[in-house]
Amino acid sequence: MRNTRIAPLVTVGIAAASLSAPIPATAFAPSGASAAANSLRQYTQQDPTWERCDAGSSADFQCATLEVPLDYSDPHGKRIDIAISRLKATSAKERRGVLLFNPGGPGGPGLNMPVELAAGLPGEVRKQYDLIGFDPRGIGRSTPVSCGLTPGEFTPDRPYHAGTFAKDVKWARTVAGKCQERNGDTLPHLTTRNTARDMDVVRAVLGERKLSYWGFSYGTYLGAVYMRMFPGRTDRFVLDSSADPAGYGRGLFQQMAEGTELAFTRWSRWTAERRATYELGDTPAEVRKTFWDLVARADREPVDHQGQSLTGDDIRAMRHMFFRAEKAAIWVADLKKAAEDRTPAPSGAPERTPAPSPSAAGLPSENEIAGLWSVMCADTARSWPRDPERYRRDAIRDKARYPLYGDLASNIKPCAFWKPGGELPTTVNNGVRALMLQNEWDPQTPLAAARGMHRALRGSRLVTVEGGEGHGVQGTNSCADRSAATYLTTGRLPAQDLTCAAETRS
């Protein structure tokens, strides 16, 4: 999923040689495809026109538009746009190359990441790297996908109830059908593999032999796919809050359910130890009972809280709250007060969804959610069951296993009715060097997911922030930041996996 907190980045690099020979087209083509050596030269040798990104941005922040083939096996066919951005390195003498960013998703626009991250970079980073952002194909300014979804069709979290399951099936089928109707010839090519190929076109156009990269959340999977497809062009890759490549797709949601239950158990212990502060129970069992009694009460009569009317299912869907123990305790205590018709304190309000990225200004509000389904389903549709009854059975089973989120995770999704992309997904399994950063208590990509990625990337080192809360490590832990800075400055990975202690936030 997308990293919604882009904090200051701590990374660095060294000077890179420019491209002196054309890149063979077969490097970009799907496996087994035969193409003339110069079939992609029209793309890799583009001369981008750099302009100020928009009237409100700094003149140093430049944007350009590249063309890439919609289908890399047919490079002379339909073309699409890829929007890229850059902040140039501040020292031509010390410049190493480029550092490309991706915020996650799939569906997250990344055009503005250079300016969002630059202020927190040390001077050596700005000297040595051009900071490069891009909107992946189908997202933001890169030939955006639109499915014509209504606001009621946006939400992927749908609790299982026997009486509403037919509506859930209809929703999933409708979303898939709308996307297919509007984008039939495009959808099969909105894949992670093709986005990785687009990244390599960007690398070539910018005159770099190798690419350095920082990816968050789904961006870790995208980075791992690039590393697998183009190992010889991979320089220094940092993967922050990793998805498990073996579980990418439906398993991503199901890993969230397992991780949520662990976080809920931890929260109940933490809150019981502070019984006098929150008055939710003297033991973990009592705290859990207080919460589930509140959920049952809200299912009977929604709770008015902070201007929202919340059912029990709505409360369960706020699963991410439990990965920050103190915030969750304040929130649940406020909900309890609201249910008892007492005035809740504003400090416990749930985190709001961030405003859309400026790169997506003027786009349909559904672009990111349409992009999520378009990419994930094109990548993994072959692995999703086609029989709705399988989802019913799995939702019932997982609600029993993981009561907080299990049924929402395993209920039917649009991928059940999606036409697969043109290629099989990438098997992530190689020895390319990379640095991984991971919070122990991450609501989107749990620690178990990062460990799965670590196993698949045999050349990686994993830096775990023990007790770390939230999605995205960069900028939140000085120990982890130092590891990233050392790696990107010198190329040295830690000698072994590293554990950092969480730091108290001010």
Image (cartoon, rainbow, N blue to C red):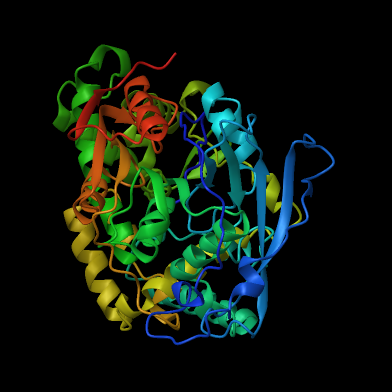
Above-or-below relation of 290 to 426: above
Across and down, in percent, residue 331 comes to 41, 29
Number of numbered discs present?
0
Q: Nearer the viewer, residue 426 or 147?
A: 426
Which residue extends farthest front? 20
Is residue 168 visible to the viewer in this orientation of the structure?
Answer: no
Q: Residue at x 49, y 54 (%)?
A: 209
Across and down, in percent, residue 430 comes to 24, 59
Which residue extends farthest right? 55
Is residue 337 visible to the viewer in this orientation of the structure?
Answer: yes
Q: Nearer the viewer, residue 349 or 453?
A: 453
Q: Residue at x 22, y 72 (%)?
A: 393
Across and down, in percent, residue 434 comes to 32, 45
Q: Residue at x 25, y 62 (%)?
A: 246
Q: What is the quadrant of residue 128 in the picture?
A: top right
Q: Is residue 445 left or right of residue 452?
A: right
The C terminus sits in image quarter: top left
